[in-house]
Image (cartoon, helix red, strand yellow):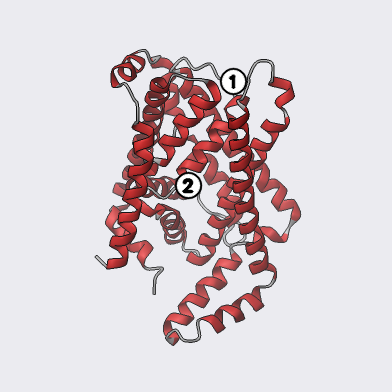
Amino acid sequence: MKRKTWIQLGLVLVLTAVFLYFFLRGIDWGDVWTYLRRVDPAWFLAAVLLAPVHLATRGLRWRYLLVHEKADVRFYNLFAANAVGFTVTFLLPGRIGEIVKPLYLARRERCRAGFAIGTIVVERIFDMMTMCSLLGLFLLARPLYAAVFKIEAQTEKNLVFWGFVGAALALSLLVLSLLFYFFKEKALRAAAAVLKPVPHRIRDVLLNLLHEFIDGLKIFHSLGNLFIYAGLSFAVWLGITFFYWVAFQAFGLGVSFFLLIPYIFLTMVGASIPTPGMVGGFHYFSKLGLVELYGVDPNLASGATLVVHAVQLVVTCLIGYAILWKDGLSLLQLKRLRETMSP
């Protein structure tokens, strides 16, 4: 293994350990077990059945981006690519599933790899913008629920801070993507100038990938398409919110659907941290949200977080492994598929 890889792995493990420390600090495992034994089996089963639904809604949304490259993309391949991508993200560090997902689909549908990767950038931009919009709606609507749901002043400030961070990141990516798309020739010429010292063969591969990547941003060409895709993004995240609402019913947490929005936003922040299987980051921000927003007992919050994360991980990986077994592929082969993007 290269020295750079070892350094990256070390940083990831340190980051994971830090977040796990803050998540596990002060937990009474006896109380956690007591809460877990009280889980309602009917609600829990419903949560298990709902866990993979976002793979389907993400697939339907993704098809809308891919139509510019191929009009008849099979829904099964969209679902499979999402399942395989999340499986790799759950099991390997560095969120390489984000690259494996479009490469897997490109291989199955025989479309351009760079184009598929470009659509993933659009996905992530809209994921962040959608959750920032929902969080903004939640904060603006505070007068409507202030009497039944009180937020500490510091907690609200933290939500506003993370909301601005997410919005700034999403807008930065959006502006960069728009510049690439609407000034394509200039972007390619600038890239060619930067890559001039690189060997000719490698430079051609990179420039071709950049060309395909920019083509994957074609949705920005139509304002109407953007509105439709934004609506699909809201459907994806409201579906994810419904999964958590059902899961928390199993623990007797009667938080209303709308009031779960800031919690979902915080878990998105935690899940974006590149730790193996989202371990640490997701757990810390999930527990933080349940305790600070809803006053949930820390041990109950810890138990609910562990179970919800386990449900997502196990269900997704079972589906992902079933698809890989059907395709005759392994995680090692998927990792190599990702490495083919590096000339």
Which residue corresponds to the image point at 29% horizontal and 21% vertical from the top-left? 29
Eyeballing the image, is 41 above or below 325? above
Disc 2 residue type? Ser
Mark 2 crowd level (few <14, some 14–19, many ≥20, 10 Å Cα)? few
For the residue pair 241 and 36, the one nearer the viewer reads as 36
Which residue corresponds to the image point at 66% horizontal and 58% vertical from the top-left? 219
**Quadrant (top left, top right, bottom left, bottom right) of the C terminus:** bottom left
Residue located beneath label 2 in the image: 272
Left or right of 55 in this view: 22: left
Q: Picture coordinates of residue 228 (x, y %)? A: 69, 46
Q: Picture coordinates of residue 199 (x, y %)? A: 42, 86
Left or right of 49 in this view: 189: right
- Number of numbered discs overlaid on the protein picture: 2
Left or right of 51 in this view: 213: right
Which residue is most to the left?
1
State whether residue 112 appears in this view. no
